[in-house]
Image (cartoon, grey):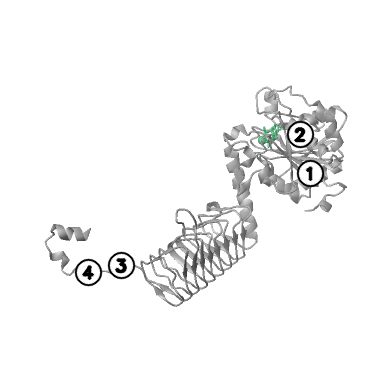
Amino acid sequence: MNRASISGVTLAPTVLILAAGQGTRMRSRTPKVLHELCGIPMVLWPVRAALTAGAGRVVVVDSPERALESVLPEGVQLAVQPRTDGTGGAVVAGVAQLDSAGAGDNAPVVVLSGDVPLVSAEAIDELVRAHEESGAGATMASTVLDDPSGYGRVVRDQHGDVERVVETKAAGDATPEQLRIREVNTGIYVFAADALREVLPRLSADNAQGELYLPQTLDLIRAGGGAVAAHTIADRRLVLGVNDRAALAQVRGLAQEAIHARHTAAGVSIVNPGATVIDVDVEIGQDTVIEPFSTIKGHTSIGAGCTVRHSYLVDCVLEDGVSVGPFAYLRPGAILRRGAKAGTFVEIKNSDIGPGAKIPHLSYIGDADVGEGTNLGASTITANYDGVEKHRTTIGKRVHGSVHVSLVAPVTVGDDAYTGAGSVIVEDVPPGALGIARARQTNKAGYAKQPKDESLNSERR
Ligand code: UD1
Ligand code: MG
């Protein structure tokens, strides 16, 4: 999708994304549109769709706290709505921002909602085309829902033309008859810039919520002799609004399905999609198998031919042919080079695990560099933190680490070195040497037959 694909439009559309509402129905201290959806804040979904659709400018309308500023990508502008006086007020603030930035041109204005996250670039493009073809002052995207509760309903006249939208959030706006309408306003519109500018100053708060309702612009455009069109979006999943946490869970399920479908189409096996969580920015190579109960978060990148079993991965890198789990926890900065293995109950953080290196069981490896072909025994632990600072552990190539070894950083184990079982390695082990650091064993012969007097008991302790 690119600008050129938007037929007949000389100016790429300006996209306003309304996101200043409190989201009271979420019952949260976090603004609604900052709730996470598959690894990124909800508001970034429509922002990305707008950018992919070739928007000339993207403006996000925020509240005066500017909570969204830090999450917006470069080039996306922020407008501030001084008071949450309704979706109409949000558009007034967005248009004022464009004008003050000297960007008040005649490009069509697409309005999206920060809480309608699954809108696609294709759906935006389709709506803009429909708007251009109809030549209307405004084109609203509508859809038909089995359960339309909570949405504004589309009232049509006897010719089937859109008359207005009635709100249903608070009692008093819609009649019982209107409440039976199943065609809803999706909160997505395209306006001719001049038609929008003309009616915005005339919005009134004379309604059940005492707010400026954006859909009132449609009445005003019609009353002024302009045409209002409705374009039906057939895939209703794209236009689901998130007003509470139940809807967020529903939308998350749909977003996750789409993410899985993208990977599956590219040759990734997701053995049980319903039991697998993969964030939107995760990359996975061909012929990789993701077994059930795995969670792959953030910017994790997984190569081709890997296997991930029942594990939790965050912001890590797996090169080709890597094997992970079951029950591994790979944290930010973990890099597993080609053919490496992190096995059962293994946690790795901020460490570079060399090609073919194996950490098969019960280990914590943090702030370490592990060389090619090294094998670390069960229960190898890096003591990377001295209570004040973190230190690095350097382990060479082809090292044979025994079981139950603590590596007290900063420390280096040379290439081809060995460690003895149960060692606490506090000094460097030279290349090819055996580092062994544990108390010698003594055996008390005949101990079991001795009377259990006090002195022996004290030895036992
Ligand atoms: C809105 C529409 C409704 C439509 C529904 C689709 C209005 C009055 N109603 O209702 O017809 O069916 O979306 O999902 O427009 N916002 C601001 N500033 C405000 C108020 C809201 O920026 O002062 C933002 C919110 O952050 C949100 C979006 O606008 O992202 C929609 O607001 P919301 O309160 O969720 O409206 P709905 O009741 O869902
Ligand atoms: Mg809403």
Circle 3 residues within 10 Å: few <14, some 14–19, many ≥20: few
Are the two marked residues, 3 and 1, in contact with CB atoms closer than 8 angstroms?
Answer: no
The answer for how far apart the CA atoms under marks 2 and 3 are is 73 Å
Circle 1 residues within 10 Å: few <14, some 14–19, many ≥20: many
Looking at the figure, which quarter contains the C terminus? bottom left
Queried on whether the Cβ of the residue with tag 4 lies below 8 angstroms from ligand 1, the answer reads no
Q: At label 4, which amino acid type do we have?
A: Asn
Q: Disc 4 vs disc 2: which is toward the camera?
A: 4
The answer for how far apart the CA atoms under marks 1 and 4 are is 84 Å
Q: Look at mark 4 in the image and give the residue it sits on.
A: 443
Q: Position of residue 456 (x, y in %)?
A: 16, 61
Q: At label 2, which amino acid type do we have?
A: Ala
User: Which numbered disc flags the more N-terminal residue, 2 or 1?
Assistant: 2
* Residue 102, quarter of the rendered image: top right
Q: Look at mark 2 in the image and give the residue it sits on.
A: 93
Mark 2, secondary structure of its residue? helix
Q: Disc 1 vs disc 4: which is toward the camera?
A: 4
Q: Disc 2 vs disc 1: which is toward the camera?
A: 2
Q: Which residue is painted at 80% across and 43% down in the image? A: 14
Q: At label 1, which amino acid type do we have?
A: Leu
The answer for how far apart the CA atoms under marks 3 and 4 are is 13 Å
Give residue 439's mark: 3
